[in-house]
Image (cartoon, rainbow, N blue to C red):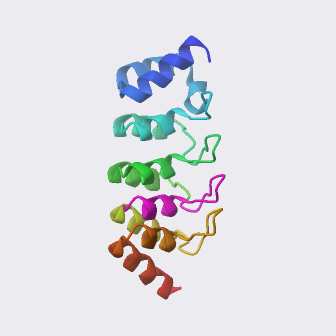
Amino acid sequence: MNNNQALFFDACRRGNLQEVTTIFEQDSTLINTTDSKGFTPLILAVYNEQPTIVDFLLQNGAQVDAQDFAGNTALMGVCFKGYKSIAEQLLAAGADVNVQNANNATALTFAATFGHLAIAEMLLQRGADVQVRDARGKSPLDHAIIQENDAMADLLEQYLNQQ
């Protein structure tokens, strides 16, 4: 990774919009570059809860469904972390709710596992597959039950019954 890339990634992590903008204006190809783990600037901004940077990156061509080396997307990251407003940004930008990572988990799998009910409902409203199974054969409903999250299990069962 060259110095400009490192500075851009760091500015995305920290939420420094002025620095992100300045570096982007010098080299717009950085928008979808990856670091040593396959993280894009968008994924890093999401993981570090930087909605202003997420907005800038999306408006300037960041690939919303780009995957890191484990196959995780920015939407999966937000479902793990529970950042509802950033989930809304990604979904508004057209994030695919049914992308699967290397373990066949989807964003809904993460939302169900980590108990983010409002995000799970947003995903379901956008067509998330409630029946998809991860590499261990577990569905989002199975994960909700394992976590003893009755509200999540009820929501997922409601969507299962509609199919």
User: Residue at position x 48%, y 17% from top?
Assistant: 7
Instruction: Write the start and end of the magenta stretch as one range.
Output: 97-115
Q: Would residue 126 be seen by someone viewing this image from the given angle?
A: no
Residue most extreme to the bottom:
161
How many numbered circles does the render carry?
Answer: 0
Q: Position of residue 142 (x, y in %)?
A: 50, 73
Judge by depth and name the residue closer to the eye, 53 or 26. Answer: 53
Quadrant position of residue 31: top right
Viewer-proximal residue among 78 and 62:
78
Quadrant of the frame with the N terminus: top right
Residue 60 or 97: which is nearer the viewer?
Answer: 97
- Specify whether residue 108 is painted magenta: yes
Choose top left, top right, bottom left or bottom right for residue 100.
Answer: bottom right
Where is residue 61 shown, x and y percent of the image?
A: 54, 38
Q: Residue furthest top?
A: 3
x 51%, y 58%: residue: 107
Residue 39 occupies quadrant = top right
Q: Where is residue 85 drawn, in percent x and y?
A: 33, 51
The relative height of residue 125 versus residue 59 in the rendered view (above or below) is below
Indicate whether 43 appears above or below 29.
Answer: below
Q: Does residue 154 belong to the magenta stretch?
A: no
> Closer to the camera, 158 or 139?
139
Residue 61 visible in the current orientation: yes
| Residue 154 horizontal/vertical position (percent) | 38, 79
- Relative to 41, is 71 on the left or the right? right
**Quadrant, the C terminus:** bottom right
Q: Main SS of the magenta segment?
A: loop
Q: Residue at x 54, y 38 (%)?
A: 62
146 is higher (above) or lower (below) than 161:
above
